[in-house]
Amino acid sequence: MSGARPVGHPERWLPARPCVGMVETASIAAGIEAVDRMLKEAPVAVVFAGPVSTGRWLSLVTGEVEEVRSALRSGVAAAADTLIDQVLIPQAAPDLVPALRGEVRPRHLDALGVLETAASTAAVLAADRAAKRAAVQLLELHLAPGIGGKGWFAITGEVSDVEAALREAAAEARARDLLVREVLIPKPDPGTWPLVLVGR
């Protein structure tokens, strides 16, 4: 994933469905301090740490549930009054962390689904829900700077499965009032895939 900064215990073995924790702050300085506190608190791996929109910072860590929960508490405490959002996903979808890292290798490209949210944390939650609710493959989860704090993800699978996954993901984002748009392309042109398979 473009813009990701993997730091802090990257060599750790990660469970097949790791816990994921996120802290978003309204201050870059507070965001950096929050990452530092999380790394000192528990042996978590940082999947993403960086600015996601003007003046905002997102930190996303992964690891065992209790480690992430402990790290998240420290990160939230460090964020103090700059905290915008905090999220804990105890059992993340298997492809979630690889998609964030840009490490997913497509098994088979079929129908394409793309969902865009107004906030990065909402994109992660929606992508996780989509990947858990239908027989689809999560290809890309994009939180990089340069898109105004938004997030988006791409999935593939049979048309009916992609449609069902998008419906579930859209409901998740809509519940947080952060859904921008979801798109289903039943038969993508071959030239479309490089647009969503970022860096591959």
Image: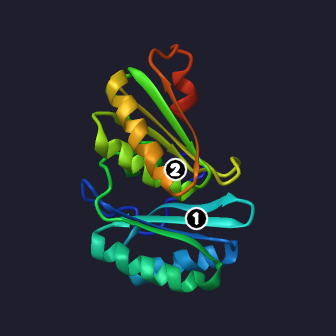
- The disc label shown at residue 178, or none: none
Residue at the image position 44 percent from the left and 47 percent from the top: 171
| Front position among marks 1 and 2 | 2
Quarter holding residue 71: bottom left
- How many numbered tags mark residues here? 2
Q: Position of residue 178 (x, y in %)?
A: 58, 52
Decide: is 100 above or below 68.
above
- As shown in the figure, which amino acid type bears the numbered disc 2? Arg
Q: Position of residue 31 (x, y in %)?
A: 61, 74
**Can residue 30 be spotted in the picture?**
yes
Decide: is 40 above or below 7.
below
Quarter holding residue 58: bottom right
Q: Nearer the viewer, residue 147 or 164?
A: 164
- The residue pinned by badge 2 equals 174
Question: Could you tell me how far apart the alpha carbons at marks 1 and 2 are, in whole angstroms?
Answer: 21 Å
Residue at the image position 33 percent from the left and 23 percent from the top: 158
Which residue is at the far right? 54
- As shown in the figure, which amino acid type bears the numbered disc 1? Leu
Which residue is at the far left? 16
Helix, strand or loop at mark 2 = helix
Residue at the image position 49 percent from the left and 17 percent from the top: 188
Quarter holding residue 105: top left
Helix, strand or loop at mark 1 = strand
Q: Where is residue 19 in the image (x, y as percent from the top left)?
A: 32, 64
Instruction: Give the mark, 1 or 2, whose residue is nearer the N terminus.
Output: 1
Q: How crowded is mark 1: few (under 14 residues within 10 Å), some or many (20 or more)?
A: many
Residue at the image position 34 percent from the left and 35 percent from the top: 137
- The residue pinned by badge 1 equals 58
